[in-house]
Image: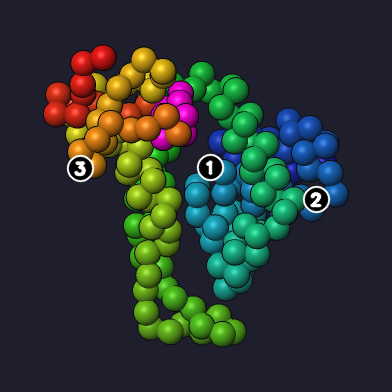
Amino acid sequence: MSDNGSKNEAKGIRIEDIPDDAVSGMKEKHILWAIHYFETDNKSKSARLAGWKPSTASTAGQRMSEREDVQGLLAYLGKHAIQNSGLDPEWVLEKLKRIAEYGLSLSKVLGPGGKDTGRTAMVDTTASLRALELLGKYQNMWGGELVQIDASTKVAVLGAGSVMDSDQWEKLAGKYIPVTATNKQDA
């Protein structure tokens, strides 16, 4: 890649530092979009920062997010960041908070040809709800202790009035669930 000074980097991620196999065949503008999107989580802003005109940034950002090569680069950047970040709970919590907030934010609903329909919708409620669930579990908002399911654990299914059968145990093996005094039985 050519060296254009700070134009080809964002928050310390430089195009030159990305292995050729991670960007093989990609245009520099597409790589820059991925780098900026990785840092901002904003498609339009990333397109503007990568060089698209403000009038086309929204459409360009959406197109970039759908490209397979860009998605592959974003996966590489995420893996690289985790390996080199000294991943800790605070970093994970911050990312989960950003996912929850972004997914619940409102976005214009566009119709055919990109026409504004005058309606708004939440961006991604599924991702937001999952992020909120994980945040709640981390904070242990529902009380009790977290128990890893194994063969010796016996937990009554709340509301079911019976202990889980062996098939249900196998599905839960290795997972963590909250256990309170009201659903824990003596072995």
Counting other residues with Cα less than 10 Å from the Cα at mark 2, is it few (<14), some (14-19), or many (20 or more)? few
Could you say where residue 59 lies in the image, as x and y percent from the top left? 60, 70
Residue type at tag 1: Glu
Residue highlighted by disc 3: 159
For the record, the magenta segment spans 168-175
Q: Is residue 184 magenta?
A: no
Residue 70 in percent (x, y) is at 70, 50
Which circle's residue, 2 or 3, is located before the other in the chain? 2
Q: How is the image coloured?
A: rainbow
Question: Position of 112 compared to 90: left or right?
Answer: right
The answer to whether 109 is drawn above or below residue 50 in the figure is: below
Q: Which mark is residue 39?
A: 1
User: CB of mark 2 within 8 Å of CB of mark 1?
Assistant: no
Name the residue that disc number 2 marks: 26
**Residue lying at 57% horizontally and 44% vertically, measured from the top left:** 38
Q: Are marks 3 and 1 in contact (CB under 8 Å)?
A: no
Mark 3 vs mark 1: which is more N-terminal? 1
Q: Is residue 90 left or right of residue 115?
A: left
Cα distance, mark 3 to mark 1?
Answer: 44 Å
CB contact under 8 Å: marks 2 and 3: no
| Residue 98, disc | none
Q: Is residue 36 visible?
A: yes
Q: Position of residue 155 (x, y in %)?
A: 27, 26
Give whichever of discs 2 and 1 has the lower sequence position: 2
What amino acid is labelled 2 in the image?
A: Met
